[in-house]
Image (cartoon, rainbow, N blue to C red):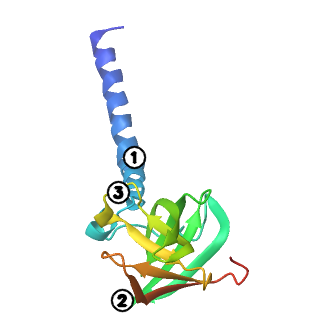
Amino acid sequence: MSKRSITALLGVGLISIGLLYQFWGREFIAQDRCLDAGGAYQQATQSCDHSMDDIAYDAFDGVTYYGVVDGKSVSLEVIGHGDGYRMSVDGKVTLGELNTERGFEQDENASLFILNWRQPEIEQIKWVKLSSDHQRLVLVDKDGKLDTAAILVATDATSN
């Protein structure tokens, strides 16, 4: 092969890679960023497509909690094997890791849901399901106290 044909072949290959990135790679990267646990990319660019949000790729046959917190519509769904969550706040979806702990304050049978549990405590979101009412999750504020104005209610009446 001549030097000219090698250069032409190399040029065609580079153009192909550039076109693949332009029409497929950038969109894939952008959609992947829309799924980050913090949602910062989505808030900064307002460019995330939520047309597929209702499709559960890794679903947990459990309870979805709904409510209004600080004037915003909130839904919280446990996904995976109970180790992940999907939370929607006014249509902005956040996925992340979930951990549960038993007991809260004097209620040893309460279940504490800790969203983003591997993150620093300031970035964690905590909800508690008290043993007196298994249909409700109550937000735990940054001081560790119950915020009784922020309550999510289960949609599945058979949940326990």
150 in relation to 10, above or below: below
Callouts 3 and 2 close, C-beta under 8 Å: no
Comparing marks 1 and 2, which lies closer to the viewer?
A: 2
Which amino acid, by three-letter code, is at mark 1?
Answer: Gly
Nearer-N-terminus badge (3/2): 2
Mark 2 neighbour density, 10 Å: few (under 14) some (14–19) many (20 or more): few
The secondary structure type at the circle numbered 2 is loop
Quarter occupied by the C terminus: bottom right
Nearer-N-terminus badge (3/1): 1
Q: Is residue 51 left or right of residue 157?
A: left
In the foreground, 138 or 73: 138
In the foreground, 22 or 113: 113
Can you tell which mark lies on residue 70?
Answer: 2
In the foreground, 91 or 101: 101
* Residue at x 63%, y 62% (from the top left corner): 59
Quarter occupied by the N terminus: top left
Comparing marks 3 and 1, which lies closer to the viewer?
A: 3
Nearer-N-terminus badge (1/2): 1
Can you tell which mark lies on residue 119?
Answer: 3
32 in relation to 18, above or below: below
Which amino acid, by three-letter code, is at mark 2?
Answer: Asp
How many numbered tags mark residues here?
Answer: 3
* Residue at x 36%, y 43% (from the top left corner): 21
Q: Is residue 156 left or right of residue 82?
A: right
The secondary structure type at the circle numbered 3 is loop
Q: Which residue has dot 1 on it? A: 25
